[in-house]
């Protein structure tokens, strides 16, 4: 059974500890919306704001670096540096101590229109012995149609360049749309998982692209580290499906993380009008969009599809924001497994764009409860969140035209 987010009668402001530094200023203009008008009206939904077991951890917020143009993703280098992608097409190496940035060369040309551009970044699991850096991005064909791409290059750290960049996979078909690229990456020892949005298809019903396994839209793809198709993928021997697909029935998944204990893959995705979801991904699973959803069509109260809990042929979300809740358009997620905040160990952190905060969720098996709203009141659309492996500090990328990357550390 999935859990539902409920309206709060009052929103509890998450207070920094008494020793916290002064509040940072809001981060300039808001970047392009990640959904059509009307979807980013959230900020106010959630649970009733009850305290978690024990006192919430006190934290302070520090600016790591600023001046980024719609940063989309962050990844940590073992030498203490940090990679940051910007939607307009820039990849930077940031010194986490002094905040200096260095632009990386050799990055592919991107289609930075609408929700497109340079998107996620991850390292090869054996980096730096295998110095591959993987990127997802939108690019166009000769007809001007766009698609989500996956590529990689070898990072020359001294030269500040990606050498020998190559395209590994293109999520087809190309379409005439500037939205719903999905594009979160997750790397494991022998495979990459890549989310692809439904590219804003409005053909609701069983013939929607996300319900059609002969294309890669609205799906999670599983690829080898060289872009090949793993032989144990769920549809690899199915003549009516593409072997790259790991799960399908998604709308626009922009958050993905591995549970540190169970190894399960968790995702969060945008609904239509509300209907945002947190899911646990199963091989071959159909996640319902748009035949089963808690969303409504934009501008109406008409539900999109059936109640997910009433269908046996789709996988229901473990947590959701139903139509009328205000939603939680998500981007970026991580499980906390660091040492800096012991009270947060095992919790799930998910950013929300329109809600403008970082949500902390307690997870017990598949039971999810929203506990805290961090960074609330800063006016920040949270694009990505990650845990630094060396310090356990939480790093957050803010989505704005002139934006910071900040970190949360114990007060």
Image (cartoon, rainbow, N blue to C red):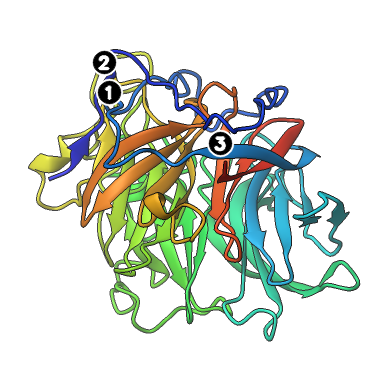
Q: CA distance from mark 2 to mark 1?
A: 8 Å
Callout 3: helix, strand or loop? strand
| Sequence-first disc among 3 and 2 | 2
In the rendered view, tell whether residue 314 sits above or below residue 324. below
Which residue was labeled with disc 1?
Answer: 323
- Asked if the residues shown at circle 3 and circle 1 are in contact, with their CB atoms under 8 angstroms apart, the answer is no
Callout 1: helix, strand or loop? loop
Where does the image place residue 405, in percent across and percent down from the top left?
Answer: 69, 42
- Horizontal side of residue 43 vs 158, given as left or right: left
Which residue was labeled with disc 3?
Answer: 382
Tag nearer the camera, 2 or 1: 1
| Sequence-first disc among 3 and 1 | 1
Which residue was labeled with disc 2?
Answer: 301
| Sequence-first disc among 2 and 1 | 2
Tag nearer the camera, 3 or 2: 3
Residue 216 visible, this orientation: no
Q: CA distance from mark 3 to mark 2?
A: 27 Å
Give me the residue at 69% from left, 37% from top.
113
Give me the residue at 44% from left, 64% from top.
221
Callout 2: helix, strand or loop? loop
- Horizontal side of residue 9 vs 397, given as left or right: left
- Asked if the residues shown at circle 2 and circle 1 are in contact, with their CB atoms under 8 angstroms apart, the answer is yes
In the rendered view, tell whether residue 102 sits above or below residue 397. below
- Horizontal side of residue 191 vs 402, given as left or right: left
């Amino acid at each position: 059974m999935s859990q539902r987010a409920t309206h709060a009668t009052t929103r509890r402001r998450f207070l920094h500890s008494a020793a916290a530094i002064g509040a940072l200023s809001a981060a300039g203009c808001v970047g392009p919306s990640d959904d059509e008008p009307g979807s980013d009206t959230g900020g106010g939904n959630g649970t009733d704001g009850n305290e978690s077991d024990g006192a919430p951890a006190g934290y302070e917020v520090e600016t790591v670096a600023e001046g980024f143009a719609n940063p989309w993703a962050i990844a940590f280098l073992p030498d203490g540096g940090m990679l940051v992608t910007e939607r307009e097409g820039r990849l930077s190496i940031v010194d986490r101590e002094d905040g200096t940035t260095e632009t990386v060369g050799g990055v592919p040309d991107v289609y930075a229109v609408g929700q497109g551009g340079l998107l996620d970044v991850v390292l090869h699991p054996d980096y730096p012995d295998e110095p591959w850096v993987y990127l997802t991005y939108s690019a166009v064909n000769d007809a001007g149609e766009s698609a989500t791409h996956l590529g990689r290059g070898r990072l020359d750290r001294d030269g500040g360049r990606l050498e020998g960049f190559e395209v590994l996979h293109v999520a087809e078909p190309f379409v005439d749309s500037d939205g719903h690229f999905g594009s979160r990456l997750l790397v494991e020892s022998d495979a990459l998982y890549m989310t692809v949005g439904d590219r804003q298809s409005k053909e609701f019903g069983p013939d929607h692209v996300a319900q059609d396994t002969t294309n890669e839209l609205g799906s999670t793809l599983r690829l080898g580290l060289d872009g090949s198709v793993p032989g144990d993928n769920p549809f690899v021997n199915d003549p009516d499906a593409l072997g790259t697909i790991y799960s399908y029935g998604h709308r626009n998944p922009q958050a993905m993380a591995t549970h540190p204990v169970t190894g399960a893959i968790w995702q969060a995705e945008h609904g239509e009008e509300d209907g945002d979801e947190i899911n646990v991904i199963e091989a071959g699973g159909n996640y319902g969009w748009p035949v089963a959803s808690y969303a409504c069509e934009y501008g109406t109260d008409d539900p999109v599809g059936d109640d997910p809990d009433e269908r046996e042929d789709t996988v229901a979300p473990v947590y959701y924001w139903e139509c009328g809740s205000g939603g939680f358009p998500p981007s970026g997620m991580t499980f906390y497994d660091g040492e800096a905040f012991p009270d947060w160990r095992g919790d799930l952190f998910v950013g929300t764009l329109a809600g403008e905060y970082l949500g902390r969720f307690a997870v017990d098996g598949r039971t999810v409860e929203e506990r805290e709203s961090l960074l609330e009141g800063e006016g920040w659309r949270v694009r990505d969140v990650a845990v630094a492996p060396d310090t356990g500090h939480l790093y957050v990328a803010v989505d704005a035209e002139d934006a910071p990357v900040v970190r949360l550390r114990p007060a």
